[in-house]
């Protein structure tokens, strides 16, 4: 099936009792046993429920994976992976990564004896040098938040596997439409479904997709059921409903972001544009190899640093100054002030989530804010 068809049909079937075309939301937390007390698929809603199963089936197929495991947020999905490690194990993560991942590794798990180090994953020699004998997990995020760095997924997965570690890719920014990390050698793909998959800034969620139904899958499945950070049936229904239009939304996000990146690259008050779609971007060749398109996210460094960047946020009218990304409306955010004093993010960096408005209106808004 083509992605557009899969996005609409996978995980959906006509409801056998009501013949409903849109899937019903099953709120029941419990399901009747058979006369011999056995049960087929559904027992209790924390374990599994029809809306969650449908979402997992759909996203797993989009990533060419064997199975999906859905969580209440992206961070809950990440925690499930990290929790599978032992004290004394080492995690290698990107220096430019989603800030809460850094916090999970350094604040929450350091006390449990987990070791973590952070490396520029765009530098393969640095990745090789940072591998330790106890490295069990190599975490990648590409394109990365907020610097829009790209990682050569196939190369890093090979480094991880050679050292006996698993490789996970946070594919939130690319979505399965632009990049399929499992096909490039990763063992697990992770999404914050809050972002492009849901796409409307109205539901939180996370999902893991596994390449195989092996021992790691079984352990993560136990974690999902027993740790209990599961998404509600309605949350799953919303994400699955939104996935129907993901292929068309992603194409439009990419079209708009390419135009906006070109406009900003030529603007005198912008020092740097981080967007792999620009020919001069250092990740352009890798992006062409590994991604179908260049994505809807970009970041810029404003001339004049912190104050100048904040001033732009105060002047935009169509872009909303807010966190998060991947939704129909355009958002802009000064990351360093959100991440706090520890943040390695450049002081004048603004992150743009380019939405689905007409690009001429978005460019006009940025032009007046940058004057
Ligand atoms: C938002 C985000 C997360 C965290 O997901 P939540 O749904 O907010 O918990 C992780 N990684 C990336 C790249 C994100 O953008």
Image: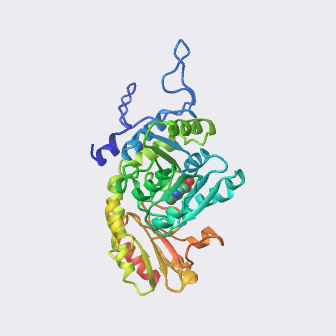
Give 103 or 136, whichever is nearer the viewer: 136
Q: Quadrant of residue 361?
A: bottom left
Q: Is residue 4 above or below residue 117?
A: above
- Measured as percent of width and height from the top left, residue 48 is found at 52, 33
Q: Is residue 221 above or below residue 345?
A: above
Residue 173 appears left or right of 13: right
Residue 164 appears left or right of 117: left
Q: Is residue 230 above or below residue 302?
A: above
- Measured as percent of width and height from the top left, residue 70 is found at 51, 42
Extreme-left residue of the structure: 2
Count of marks placed on residues: 0
- Measured as percent of width and height from the top left, residue 196 is found at 43, 55
Residue located 36% across and 44% down the image: 64
Quadrant where the image shows the N terminus = top left
Extreme-right residue of the structure: 111
Residue located 36% across and 49% down the image: 183
């Amino acid at each position: 099936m083509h992605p557009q068809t899969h996005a609409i049909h996978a995980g959906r079937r006509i409801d056998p009792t009501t013949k409903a075309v849109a899937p019903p939301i099953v709120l029941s937390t419990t399901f009747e046993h058979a006369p011999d007390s056995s049960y087929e698929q559904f027992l209790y809603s924390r374990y599994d429920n029809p809306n969650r199963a449908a979402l997992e089936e759909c996203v797993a197929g989009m990533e060419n994976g064997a199975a999906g495991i859905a969580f209440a947020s992206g961070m809950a999905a990440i925690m499930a992976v990290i929790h599978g490690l032992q004290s004394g194990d080492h995690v290698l993560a990107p220096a430019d990564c989603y800030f809460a991942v850094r916090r999970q590794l350094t604040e929450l798990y350091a006390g449990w004896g987990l070791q973590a180090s952070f490396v520029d994953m765009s530098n393969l020699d640095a990745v090789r040098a940072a591998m330790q004998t106890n490295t069990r997990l190599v975490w990648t995020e590409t394109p990365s938040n907020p610097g829009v760095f790209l990682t050569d997924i196939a190369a890093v997965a090979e480094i991880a596997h050679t050292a006996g570690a698993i490789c996970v890719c946070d594919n939130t920014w690319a979505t399965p439409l632009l990049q399929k990390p499992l096909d490039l050698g990763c063992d697990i793909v992770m999404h914050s479904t809050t972002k492009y998959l849901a796409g409307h800034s109205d539901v939180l969620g996370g999902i893991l997709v596994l390449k195989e139904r092996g021992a790691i899958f079984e352990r993560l499945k136990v974690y999902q059921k027993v740790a209990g950070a599961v998404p509600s049936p309605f949350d799953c229904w919303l994400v699955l409903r939104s996935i129907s239009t993901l292929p068309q939304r992603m194409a439009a996000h990419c079209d708009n972001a390419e135009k906006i990146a070109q406009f900003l690259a030529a603007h005198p008050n912008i020092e740097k544009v981080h967007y792999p779609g620009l020919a001069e971007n250092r990740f352009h060749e890798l992006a062409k190899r590994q991604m179908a398109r260049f994505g809807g996210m970009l970041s810029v460094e404003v001339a004049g640093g912190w104050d100048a960047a904040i001033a732009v946020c105060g002047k935009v009218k169509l872009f909303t100054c807010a966190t998060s990304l991947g939704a129909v409306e355009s958002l802009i955010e000064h990351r360093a002030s959100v991440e706090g004093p520890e943040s390695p993010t450049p002081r004048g960096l603004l992150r743009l989530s380019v939405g689905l408005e007409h690009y001429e209106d978005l460019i006009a808004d940025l032009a007046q804010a940058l004057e």
